[in-house]
Amino acid sequence: MTVPEEAEDEPARRKPDDDQPVPLYVVTGGRSESADAMALDLVTLVVARADPHSGQSPEHTALLRMCRYPISVAEISAYLGLPFSAVTVLLTDLLDSSQVEVRQTRVEQRQAAADPDLDTLRALIDGLQRL
Amino acid sequence: MVHVGSLERTSRPVLPSGRWFLPPALVALGALGAVFLVPADARLAVVWCGALATLAVLLMAGETARRGRVVRLLRERVHQQVGDADLMAYDLLPVALDRMKNGDLEDDVIPSLPEETASDPQLVAAFEGMAFGILDVLREKELQRDSAKRAIVNIAHRIQSEIHRLQDDIAKMQFRHGTPEVLSDLMHLEHRINVTGRFATSLAVVGGGAPVRRWARPISLHDVMRAGSGPINEYLRVEQHRVIETAVVGHAVEPLIMIMGELLDNATRYSPPSSTVVMNTEEVASGVEVSIEDKGAGLTEESRRRAEFLLQQGVDGLDLEDLGETARIGLRVAGILASHHGVKISLRPSTCEGVRAVVFLPDDLLTAVPPPKYPVPAIRPTPQWHLPIGELDEEAPAYERNANGLPQRRRRRSAAGAHAPAPRAAVEPAAARRASPERRESGLWVDAFFAGIRSEPEEPPPGEGSGEARRPGP
């Protein structure tokens, strides 16, 4: 679960307009890790289940608004300008209150890769031989 | 010995004239008597003696009278000069000193004496000499104070810019190292750095400088309030309730963050460590009030007055010696910044015995909330996913055989309807999208995503095939 090394391409200094006035530790309330390290990764799709209500932090509100449509964690991270781990912390908050749902894409693929379906492989071999 | 100024007065008759004439008249009278009494042969001699004696007494009396007049005049002058000196010492000089204390060190601060009191040019010269002497000393001191302040501001600014560089670096590192452990350490570092940065900014502000960081765009009030809790030690105890949807204009953002930081620091410092400090906003006539309420022991009337005094004192009233009082410096900083930006701060007793600091932001510091930088899709029926986290979204990898007999992976959404059993989860969004009149919107996020990647102006979203584009087959 590491963020790709894209920081190297960045200009030496960020534009002041890209700065966020609120420090990251205030956004996440000092947490850097979600309580149960859930299988959230960069391509996990997130969709909102509820509308934002007043009293939520701006990041939670933004997250719920942009997730009306399924959107990947990577995109959320880019739009909010927050690191991936911080986004997972925020997402876990919303998951705990059932305001969003996530859908794994990688887990199934990983499982499929670890436990290949023999029928499919056999069908593949058969089909290739028939060509 | 007698001054020009007073010479005119000598011509004025001061004594009742003629009294000094009495002694010589008596002598003359005596001599005349003696002339008649003495024998005739001695008469001539007596006449001479009498005449001489009368002359001598006349001269003496005249001289005495003149001196008497001079003494009288001198006494008068002394009285007048004492009066003038009183006027200078007790009326004119204190006013001038007050003005000098308030920073008016121009030459015209020395008052010119009124015409009628200018009894004595020497006295006037002496007064002016003394006043200019004081002025010189004060100027010298002011110069030293200024240069000391400048040095402090200079150093504080250097620390500030170094800290901003650190903050930038840390922000970049937070993106570069996504692992929670490293991020946790980076957050801790960022917090410590921000606390240090607040001290450096305080120092600069107290010395007459300003926060180095500037914002070109408006920042939402909620963000400003949260950013205010960033550079204090116990930021986790600060909560925001009821925040009005408004934004703060760029130039006032950093000062407001500082003001709120100092007030929050004060609030968390003087309240029990387990209690929360609550921030609230309220719309009032011609502005917005942000209140910071703690649950501490509150302020006595005297300490409240003292705190308000500190808040209202401008930068000019400050001496560098006051820097020693660390606990008080925060309120001063808040007061100085507030006075620069038309913000009013007042301290009121809170309902729960604590202190309620109220920051009034006038309308001209507020502006509309900037639009979000992320795309907000139009409202549409949310897809009906029923599978909890971690479960596969498909019952089993369902493959079809193509004409060649090769397994072909089903297109997850667009083709799902046409083929054999698929979970409801996959069918419904596809079907809904196909039937939906809002077809254009279905691909918006893809467009936005690619537009973001390409950093090119957004192209019109493709109408047909957007479903394909959204989830291309793996």
Image (cartoon, coloured by chain):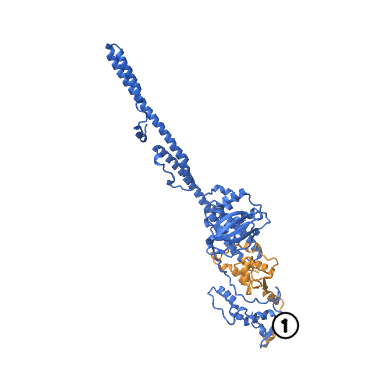
Chain colours: A orange, B blue
Tell me which residue sits at (41%, 33%) in the image.
B76
Which residue position is annotated with label 1? A119
Q: Residue at x 60, y 54 (%)?
A: B347
Query: Quarter holding the C terminus of chain B?
Result: bottom right
Quadrant the N terminus of chain B occupies: top left
- Image quadrant where residue B468 sits: bottom right
What subunit carries mark 1? Answer: A
Q: Please say whether residue B193 is visible from this viewpoint.
A: no
Which residue occupies the foreground of this view, B156 or B255? B255
Residue B85, given in percent of the width and then of the height, sits at: 44, 37
Rendered location of residue B391, percent (x, y): 71, 75
In the displayed structure image, the side of residue B144 where residue B415 appears, left or right: right
Residue B411 location (% of width, % of height): 65, 82
Foreground pick, B192 / B32: B32
Q: Is residue B9 above or below residue B49?
A: below
Kind of residue at badge 1: Asp
Residue at coordinates 36% horizontally, 36% vertically from top-left? B5
Can residue B439 be seen in this snapshot? yes
Q: How many marks?
A: 1
Q: In x, y percent, where is residue B239?
A: 64, 60
Q: Is residue B315 left or right of residue B63?
A: right
